[in-house]
Image: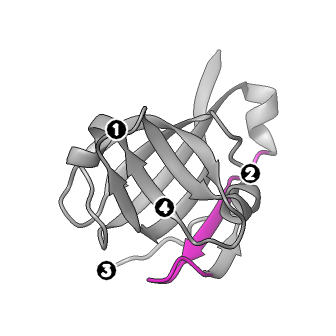
């Protein structure tokens, strides 16, 4: 059996640009891509915390330390500068691979600086 698991997450990134007249994709600061383990051209899912939009595109590398998160092409209709988004990548693996796997979770502030990293989501009980 193959399982699709969360591989990486950039949590609450802030959109810096929204470029409609662009070939497509989402440009992400190269240092943030490396921190999360997301590869250039890898499929990503974007969940817009600000407006509830959800869409799939692919990552492209923006300049290291630029703090850029640019939603481009048709997806620009789904996110605007200032929106907070969650960027996720998933991996397909078999049960043996999944047993020891832990995702790379990267938490960002409103200026796209890394404020924390971990490999598990803490359970919160209300």
Q: What residue is rendered at 65% in x and 80% in y? A: 116
Q: What residue is rendered at 76% in x and 57% in y? A: 34
Percent from the top left, x then y, of residue 1? 65, 15
The quadrant holding residue 3 is top right
Kindly tell me whether residue 7 is visible in this rendering. Answer: no
Mark 2 vs mark 4, CA separation in Å: 16 Å
The segment highlighted magenta reads: 101-113
Mark 3 vs mark 1, CA separation in Å: 39 Å
Q: What residue is rendered at 31% in x and 68% in y? A: 81
Mark 3 vs mark 2, CA separation in Å: 32 Å
Characterize the magenta stretch by its predominant secondary structure.
Answer: loop
Dot placed on the residue nearer the N-terminal end, 2 or 4: 2
| Marks 1, 2: nearer the viewer | 1
The residue at which mark 1 appears reads as 73
Dot placed on the residue nearer the N-terminal end, 1 or 2: 2
The residue at which mark 4 appears reads as 69
Element assignment for label 2:
loop
The residue at which mark 2 appears reads as 37
Kindly tell me whether residue 2 is visible in this rendering. Answer: yes
Percent from the top left, x then y, of residue 99? 77, 40
Circle 2 Cα neighbour tier, 10 Å, few/some/many (<14 / 14–19 / ≥20): some
Residues tagged 1 and 2 counted as in contact (Cβ below 8 A): no
Mark 1 vs mark 2, CA separation in Å: 24 Å
Element assignment for label 4:
strand
| 111, above or below 24, in the image | below
The residue at which mark 3 appears reads as 126
| Marks 3, 2: nearer the viewer | 2
Residues tagged 2 and 4 counted as in contact (Cβ below 8 A): no
| Marks 4, 3: nearer the viewer | 4
């Amino acid at each position: 059996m193959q399982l699709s698991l969360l591989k990486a997450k950039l949590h609450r990134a802030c959109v810096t640009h929204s470029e409609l007249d662009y070939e497509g994709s989402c440009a992400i600061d190269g240092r943030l891509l490396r921190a999360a383990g997301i590869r250039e051209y890898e499929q990503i899912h974007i969940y817009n915390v600000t407006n509830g939009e959800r869409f799939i595109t692919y990552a492209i590398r923006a300049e290291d330390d630029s703090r850029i998160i640019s939603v481009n092409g048709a997806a620009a209709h789904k996110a605007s500068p200032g929106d907070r988004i969650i960027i996720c990548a998933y991996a397909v693996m078999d049960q043996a691979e999944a047993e020891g796997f832990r995702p790379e979770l990267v938490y960002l502030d409103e200026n796209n600086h890394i404020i924390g990293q971990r490999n598990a989501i803490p359970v919160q009980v209300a």
